[in-house]
């Protein structure tokens, strides 16, 4: 039987340990959430953008579910057993009891206020999902806090908006949102909110951030919309277009 590995106290080191253990067993896992922005965006370490990152969010493949479970338990993480049984193949939750840390593992799909399939994006990058997909996970948040705003601002601070390789892929975001009015609407409202909050958080860097936000909005606005998008737009905001994730409190962490 494999021995239990000492878990790092630093959350990013702990996430890297999980990813590297997965790689050694041909299981690919990639970071998302606040730690991914910390890993990918140098600006996240500046005082104006800094935020605490305790818990770990990872994306994996559904087909690797059982291998992921074995990796987590071999490393010494405690499973949230009932949740994991009920959500097998969709999402898993584990705990590092010593460091009071939670690990969320999304399988193929990221499901919160909106649902995105990121299975193919797991193939890219070294430790994190690509910046475009990371940004999508924040743009889709309806009830935002400062941590979401800071993550989005470091993304726009450190990466330009592009319509090709490199940077924040405006063409990818536009293609996705031009097929789904609900996604488009949530993204658009979030981008407006980022521009409103930028002067407060980013200070003298707010114009750089806002100029890139406007560039993304222009690409989104200019993309041809699908028939389904146009039909849903006629209904508009009279019917809710997003989900509010249920709270799943961490009784195990106290």
Image: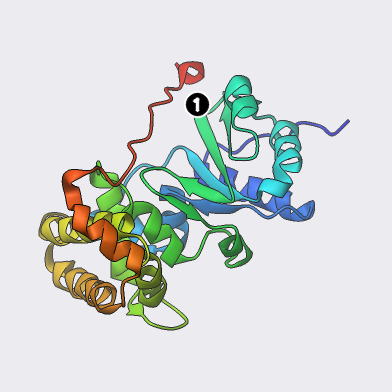
Number of marks drawn: 1
- Above or below for 91 versus 115: above
Q: Position of residue 198 (x, y in %)?
A: 15, 60
Relative vertical location of residue 180 with respect to residue 33 in this rendering, above or below: below
Depth check, front residue: 51 or 34: 34
Q: Classify 254 as above or below 75.
A: above
- Seen from the viewer's position, the closer of residues 242 and 29 is 242
> Looking at the picture, how far across and down is residue 208, in whole percent?
20, 74
Q: Is residue 57 left or right of residue 179?
A: right
Against 145, residue 126 (above or below) is below
Residue 244 visible = yes
The C terminus: image quadrant: top left
Q: Is residue 153 visible?
A: no
Residue marked by disc 1: 100
Q: Quadrant of the N terminus?
A: top right
Mark 1 is surrounded, within 10 Å at the Cα level, by few (under 14), some (14 to 19) or many (20 or more) other residues, namely: some
Residue drawn at x 17%, y 69% is 210
Residue 168: x and y in percent read 38, 72
Q: Nearer the viewer, residue 132 or 146?
A: 132
Image location of residue 164, percent across then percent down? 43, 83
Q: Residue furthest right?
A: 1
Which of these two is toward me, 161 or 99?
161
Look at the numbered disc 1 and give the secondary structure of its residue: loop
């Amino acid at each position: 039987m494999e021995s239990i590995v000492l878990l790092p106290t630093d959350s990013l080191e702990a996430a890297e340990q999980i990813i590297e253990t997965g790689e050694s067993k041909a299981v690919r896992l990639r970071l998302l959430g606040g730690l991914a922005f910390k890993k990918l965006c140098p600006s996240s370490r500046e005082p104006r953008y800094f935020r605490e990152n305790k818990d770990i969010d990872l994306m994996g493949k559904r087909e690797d579910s059982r291998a992921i479970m074995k990796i987590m338990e071999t490393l010494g993480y405690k499973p949230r057993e009932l949740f994991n049984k009920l959500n097998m193949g969709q999402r898993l939750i584990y705990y590092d009891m010593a460091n009071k840390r939670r690990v969320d593992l999304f399988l193929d799909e990221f499901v919160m206020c909106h649902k995105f399939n990121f299975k193919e994006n797991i193939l890219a990058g070294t430790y994190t999902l690509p910046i475009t997909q990371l940004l999508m996970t924040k743009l889709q948040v309806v009830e935002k806090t400062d941590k979401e705003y800071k993550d989005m601002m470091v993304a726009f601070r450190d990466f330009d908006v592009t319509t090709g390789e490199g940077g924040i892929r405006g063409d990818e975001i536009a293609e996705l949102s031009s097929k789904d009015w609900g996604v488009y609407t949530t993204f658009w409202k979030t981008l407006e909110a980022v521009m409103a909050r930028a002067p407060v958080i980013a200070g003298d860097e707010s114009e750089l951030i806002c100029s890139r936000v406007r560039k993304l909005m222009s690409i989104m606005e200019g993309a041809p919309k699908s028939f389904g998008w146009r039909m849903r737009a006629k209904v508009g905001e009279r019917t809710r277009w997003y989900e509010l994730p249920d709270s799943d409190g961490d009784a195990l962490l106290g």
